[in-house]
C-alpha cells in the first residue's frame, strides 16, 4: 500500500519504518520544508523517505496522522484539499476531541481513530528507539471507516499487535483514563511512570479514579473506580522506568497534551454536571507550568 504519514515525530517515524519494512511505500507530510527525511531505528540501516509530495498524497491508499491532538487542525488544513475522497484517514494520538474536526473537514472519507501503547523515542533528529512493546487499537468513526477493518491486518503485519475495535470510543476512553491518571502527575513530579505506585499517592489516585469512572459511566462506558485505578497501576508498573509523554513535554518545555487528555475529561464532566476537583487541580497546575515557559 502507499502511505502518507502526517508528522515525523517519534510515533510517525516508528510507523514509517515498520510499514516500510513490511513492504509498503511510505512518504512523510511534515511542516519542515524538505523533500526527503532520513529515519532509522537505533542500530539499523538508514532509510530516506520522500516528504511533502502532493502527488504522493493524491495517490495514497491511506493517510496516517501521527501528530498531537492540538496539531491535527493545522495538519488537516494543510493537506485536506489534496486527499482523494475514497482514501481512508487514520488519526493516532493521545487524548480525545478531534473526531468532530475530522468528520467536518473530510466528510466523504473513511475516517478512523487509533490508540497505541507502543513506546517510541526520538534519540536524535534522524534516529528513533522503540522503547516499549505495546498494542494498537483501531476503529472507524463513520460508516465507511467502519468498513476498513483490513487496515487492522495491515498494521498487525507491520507493528503487532493491532486489534480492530467495533467501538473505538471505548478503547479511547480506557486509554484516556490511564493518561489522566499517569501523565499530569508524572509531569508535575518530574518522575518516571512507576512513581504513581508509591502509597503516598494513593489518596490522590483514588480521587482521580472516582471522578474519571463517573464521567465514563455518564458517557455510556460502564466502568468502576477500581477498574480505572487497577488499569493505571498495571500500565505504570509495566512502564515503571519510562517517562510519560507529558513528563517529556514539560521537561523540554513543549506544549503538552493536557487539553486533549484531562481537558477533554473535564469538558465532558461539565456537560454531565459531574464535579472533577482533583482532575481540575492537575489541569490548572500543568497549564500554569506551560504559561511559565514564556517568562523564564
Ligand atoms: O501513553 C502514555 C504516555 O506516556 O503518553 C502512557 C500510557 C502513560 C505510557 O507512558
Image (cartoon, rainbow, N blue to C red):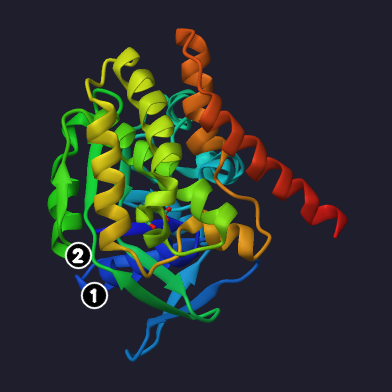
Q: Can residue 172 be seen from the camera position used here?
A: yes
Find residue 190 and report its horizontal and vertical position in percent: 56, 62
Query: Which residue is found at the position 60% from the left and 33% from the top?
Result: 281
| Disc marking residue 158 | 2
Residue 138 image offset from top left, x and y in percent = 24, 42
Instruction: Look at the numbered discs 1 and 2 and tell me whether their residues touch, using CB distance below 8 Å.
Output: yes
Disc 1: CA contacts within 10 A as few (<14), some (14-19) or many (>=20): few
Outermost top residue: 273
Residue 258 versus residue 186 in the image, above or below: above
Quarter of the displayed picture in which ligand 1 can be seen = bottom left
Q: At x 32% / y 36%, what residue is drawn?
A: 172
Q: Residue at x 24, y 52 (%)?
A: 234
Q: Residue furthest right?
A: 295
Q: Is the C-beta of the residue carrying label 1 under 8 Å from the nearest atom of ligand 1?
A: no
| N-term mark: 1 or 2 | 1
Q: Residues within 10 Å of mark 2 (few under 14, many from 20)?
A: many
Q: Is residue 286 left or right of residue 150?
A: right
Q: Secondary structure at mark 1?
A: helix
Q: Which mark is residue 167?
A: none
Q: CA distance from mark 1 to mark 2?
A: 7 Å
Q: Is residue 133 above or below residue 204?
A: below
Return the mark for residue 21. Answer: 1
Residue 30 visible within the image: no
Label 2 element class: helix
Amino acid at each position: 500500500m502507499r502511505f502518507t504519514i502526517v508528522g515525523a515525530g517519534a510515533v510517525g517515524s516508528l510507523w514509517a519504518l515498520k510499514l516500510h519494512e513490511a513492504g509498503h511505500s511510505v512518504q512523510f507530510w511534515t511542516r519542515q520544508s524538505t523533500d526527503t527525511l532520513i529515519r532509522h531505528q537505533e542500530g539499523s540501516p538508514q532509510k530516506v523517505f520522500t516528504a511533502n509530495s502532493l502527488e504522493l498524497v493524491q495517490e495514497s491508499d491511506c493517510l496516517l496522522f501521527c501528530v498531537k491532538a492540538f496539531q491535527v487542525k493545522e495538519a488537516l488544513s494543510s493537506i485536506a484539499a489534496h486527499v482523494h475522497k475514497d482514501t481512508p484517514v487514520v488519526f493516532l494520538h493521545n487524548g480525545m476531541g478531534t473526531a468532530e474536526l475530522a468528520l467536518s473537514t473530510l466528510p466523504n472519507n473513511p475516517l478512523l481513530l487509533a490508540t497505541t501503547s507502543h513506546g517510541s523515542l526520538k534519540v536524535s533528529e534522524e534516529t528513533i528507539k522503540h522503547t516499549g512493546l505495546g498494542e494498537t487499537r483501531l476503529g472507524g468513526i463513520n460508516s465507511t471507516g467502519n468498513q476498513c477493518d483490513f487496515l487492522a491486518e495491515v498494521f498487525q503485519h507491520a507493528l503487532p499487535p493491532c486489534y480492530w475495535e467495533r467501538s473505538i470510543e471505548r478503547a479511547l476512553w480506557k486509554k484516556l483514563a490511564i493518561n489522566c491518571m499517569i501523565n499530569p502527575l508524572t509531569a508535575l513530579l518530574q518522575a518516571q511512570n512507576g512513581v504513581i505506585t508509591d502509597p503516598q499517592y494513593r489518596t490522590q489516585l483514588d480521587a482521580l479514579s472516582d471522578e474519571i469512572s463517573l464521567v465514563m459511566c455518564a458517557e455510556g462506558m460502564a466502568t468502576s473506580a477500581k477498574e480505572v485505578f487497577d488499569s493505571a497501576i498495571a500500565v505504570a508498573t509495566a512502564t515503571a522506568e519510562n517517562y510519560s509523554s507529558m513528563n517529556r513535554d514539560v521537561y523540554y518545555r513543549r506544549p503538552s497534551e493536557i487539553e486533549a487528555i484531562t481537558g477533554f475529561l473535564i469538558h465532558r464532566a461539565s456537560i454531565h454536571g459531574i464535579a472533577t476537583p482533583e482532575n481540575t487541580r492537575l489541569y490548572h497546575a500543568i497549564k500554569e507550568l506551560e504559561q511559565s515557559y514564556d517568562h523564564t
